Amino acid sequence: MMTLAAYLESPNALALTALAEAVGISKGRLSQLRDSREWPPSLALAVERETGGALNASLICPVVAAARQGIAA
């Protein structure tokens, strides 16, 4: 599973600051989620969009995963 930390080390990744700006949160808040698998759903979806799917929202947010599988969270 790719975490934010792994994404940031990958080639062509956005920098933490650029990604934070793209999703509309502070760099500090995004840094807090570096190794988390419990992201807020809206933020997980925004990060998935901004990373071109490199960070899959289903893998970093159980609510998104459940919704995509049609399971009540």
Image (cartoon, rainbow, N blue to C red):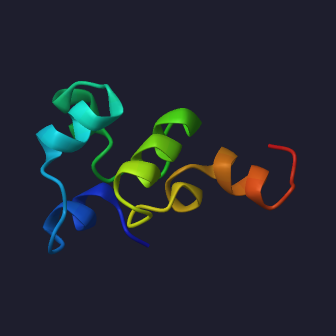
Q: Position of residue 55 (x, y in %)?
A: 41, 61
Residue at horizontal 23 percent and vertical 59 percent from the top: 5
Q: Position of residue 48 (x, y in %)?
A: 45, 53
Q: Position of residue 11 (x, y in %)?
A: 14, 74
Location of residue 26 by image quarter:
top left
Residue at horizontal 38 percent and vertical 67 percent from the top: 54
Q: How many numbered marks are there?
A: 0
Q: Position of residue 39 (x, y in %)?
A: 48, 41
Residue at horizontal 32 percent and vertical 26 percent from the top: 24
34 in relation to 7, above or below: above
44 in relation to 35, above or below: above
Apparent side of residue 7 relative to residue 11 in the rendered image (left or right): right
Apparent side of residue 10 relative to residue 33 in the rendered image (left or right): left
Question: Observer-nearest residue: 46 or 64?
Answer: 46
Location of residue 28 by image quarter:
top left
Q: Quadrant of the N terminus?
A: bottom left
Apparent side of residue 4 relative to residue 8 in the rendered image (left or right): right
Apparent side of residue 50 relative to residue 9 in the rendered image (left or right): right
18 in relation to 15, above or below: above
Question: Observer-nearest residue: 43 or 61?
Answer: 43
